[in-house]
Amino acid sequence: MIQGSLTKHGYAAPLSRPKASRGFTLVELMVTVVIISVLAAIATPGILARVNSYRTRSAAEMIASTYRLARLRAMGRGSAVVVRYNAGVITVLEGIQGSESSAAGCQNLPAPSCTTPATRFNSGSTDYQTIESYDVAYGGAYTLAASLGTVSDVCFTPLGRAYSRTSITGTFAQMLTPATVSVTHSSGGLVRQVLVLPNGTARVTAGAL
């Protein structure tokens, strides 16, 4: 006998039975997994491209920051400061009095000239000191191309002016056109370009795909 509840007319209405709970079938679970896998496969390349573009910009910003800080160091200390690009390795050098100083204890005092002596920043010279050096290519993770060549120097004077040369034994000349360093991730993607202007300032711009 089905029990009921009393209505306002006095009739007993049968109570509804609860429906049996229903779970997911194996086929439904498999279809869900396949859909998620397809969506992940579609989204992954885009996510990786964004990550690589971000890393490329970070590498370019590091280079631009090195040029900016080198210029500030030159202006702040009254010294000639060189940013050397050598096949993906960035090195910062500062001119010092070195062996030319006749006064004892003055060898490490700043030297203000990029061009005198002409050999100040040549290999083997004792007229400069190394401030920092790092591999911006990170062991081949990035491809770099410098407009001044595979090996080049940009020298900043205490007035913030920029001089450049296309070898480490050449003669410095005042920069009249911008110098660039292009940075590309090894997997491709957006190119970031470091722009060093003749007035010594540096910034990052976006290149072409």
Image: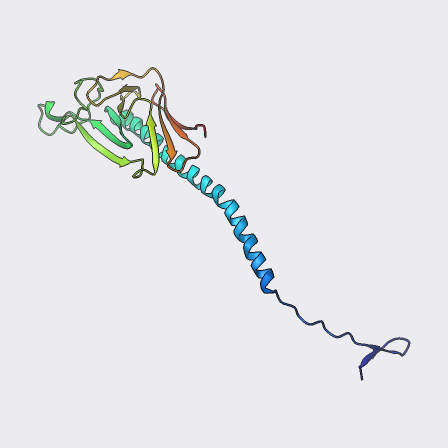
State which quadrant residue 206 falls in. top left
Q: What is the quadrant of the C terminus in the image? A: top left
Point 38% across, 33% down: residue: 184
Q: Is residue 58 left or right of residue 161?
A: right
Query: Can residue 168 be seen here?
Result: yes
Q: Is 44 placed above or below 20 here?
A: above
Which of 80 and 142 lies nearest the eye of the viewer?
142
Which of 104 and 151 lies nearest the eye of the viewer?
151
State which quadrant residue 55 falls in. top left
Residue 123 rendering spot, x and y as whole percentages: 16, 26
State which quadrant residue 79 falls in. top left
Q: Tell me which colouring the rendered structure shows.
A: rainbow
Which of 189 and 170 lies nearest the eye of the viewer?
189
Query: Can residue 61 be seen here?
Result: no
Point 27% across, 30% down: residue: 87
Residue 28 rendering spot, x and y as whole percentages: 60, 60
Q: Is residue 151 left or right of residue 15?
A: left
Point 27% across, 32% down: residue: 90
